[in-house]
């Protein structure tokens, strides 16, 4: 039976992109070289730098292991992942991963997230702030904002997750099938919090695996003041979900 048959689909990594031409080929080659049979879905928001052209060129090499969803305009991280989740569910993938294109998340850690999820967790977070996790090459103010945001979120929501804004995550199919994806409100860091919060409130087990997070070496960060504000105010709104 062909490896891309629906009955064989197991692990899908979703990577949203906007102007990632410096990183996209390297991250694709690295993920698809890993043992374990990963597939990739790139969700590109109309990158003017030609990111999608690189992906489409590589599709000729990788076939059904590499897929692309092209969207018109910069529609936000959260909506990119929601679109990717729906795509994955339609194709019956069992484990669905989020990760960045810029190597701030080490692709080698995908297997550790998968192992933890396959061993019984419903959601596994690649965590900077659990025991053994760390951050490399971030300025002190970014670390302060990130750690402060994590503590702030725990205090308000009581959710037992040390790194609620983490964007390196493995979801089991049953979690994404249960969360009402069309009702997810937020698009930035608050999206990451909301997905974990909804999973926790539904009774799913969330695990954390320590990772080393490294600041991007190439390309431009998508962080903005509006994203931080959305997370600060968003956690209060989540208590009403």
Image (spheres, grey):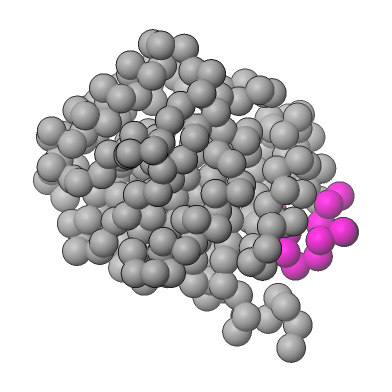
User: Can residue 228 be seen by looking at this rendering?
Assistant: no
- How many callouts does the rendering have? 0
Say if 6 sits above or below 22 in the image.
Answer: below
The vertical placement of 6 against 156, above or below, is below
Q: Which residues are magenta?
A: 57-69
Residue at 68% in and 52% down: 31
The answer to whether residue 68 is magenta is yes
**Residue 36 shows up from this direction:** yes
Foreground of the two, 13 or 233:
13
Residue displayed at 38% across by 19% down: 143
Q: Residue at x 67, y 37 (%)?
A: 46
* As drawn, 172 above or below 191: below
Q: Main secondary structure of the magenta part?
A: helix
Q: Is residue 118 left or right of residue 235?
A: right
Answer with left or right where residue 152 lies relative to residue 134. left
Q: Is residue 123 magenta?
A: no
Q: Position of residue 205 (x, y in %)?
A: 26, 61
Q: Seen in the image, is 152 located left or right of residue 163?
A: left
Res 187 → quadrant: top left
Q: Nearer the viewer, residue 213 or 78?
A: 213
Q: Can you give x and y, in whole percent of width and height, for residue 219 in the image?
A: 67, 23
Image coordinates of residue 200 in percent, x first then y, are 22, 56
Q: Residue 163, how many percent across, how many down?
A: 32, 38
Outermost bottom residue: 1
Residue 176: quarter of image:
bottom left
Which quadrant is the N terminus positioned in? bottom right
Residue appearing at x 12%, y 34% in the figure: 156
């Amino acid at each position: 039976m062909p490896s891309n048959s629906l009955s064989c689909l197991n692990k899908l990594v979703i990577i949203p992109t906007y102007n990632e031409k410096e990183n996209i080929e390297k991250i694709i080659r690295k993920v698809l070289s890993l043992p374990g049979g990963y597939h990739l879905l790139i969700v590109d928001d109309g990158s003017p730098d030609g990111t999608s052209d690189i992906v489409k060129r590589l599709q000729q090499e990788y076939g059904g292991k590499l897929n692309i969803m092209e969207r018109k305009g910069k529609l936000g991280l959260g909506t990119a992942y929601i679109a990717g989740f729906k795509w994955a569910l339609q194709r019956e993938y069992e484990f669905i991963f989020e990760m960045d294109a810029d190597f701030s998340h080490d692709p080698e850690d995908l297997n550790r997230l998968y192992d933890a999820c396959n061993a019984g967790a419903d959601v596994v977070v690649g965590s900077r702030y659990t025991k053994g996790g760390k951050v490399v090459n971030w300025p002190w103010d970014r670390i302060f904002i990130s750690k402060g945001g994590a503590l702030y979120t725990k205090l308000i929501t009581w959710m037992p997750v040390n790194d609620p804004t983490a964007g390196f995550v493995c979801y089991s199919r049953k979690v994404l099938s249960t969360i009402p994806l069309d009702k997810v409100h937020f698009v930035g860091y608050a999206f990451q919090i909301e997905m974990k919060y909804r999973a926790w409130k539904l009774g799913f087990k969330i695990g954390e695996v320590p990772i080393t997070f490294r600041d991007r070496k190439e390309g431009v960060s998508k962080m903005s003041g509006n994203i931080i504000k959305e997370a600060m105010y968003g956690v209060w709104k989540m208590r009403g979900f």
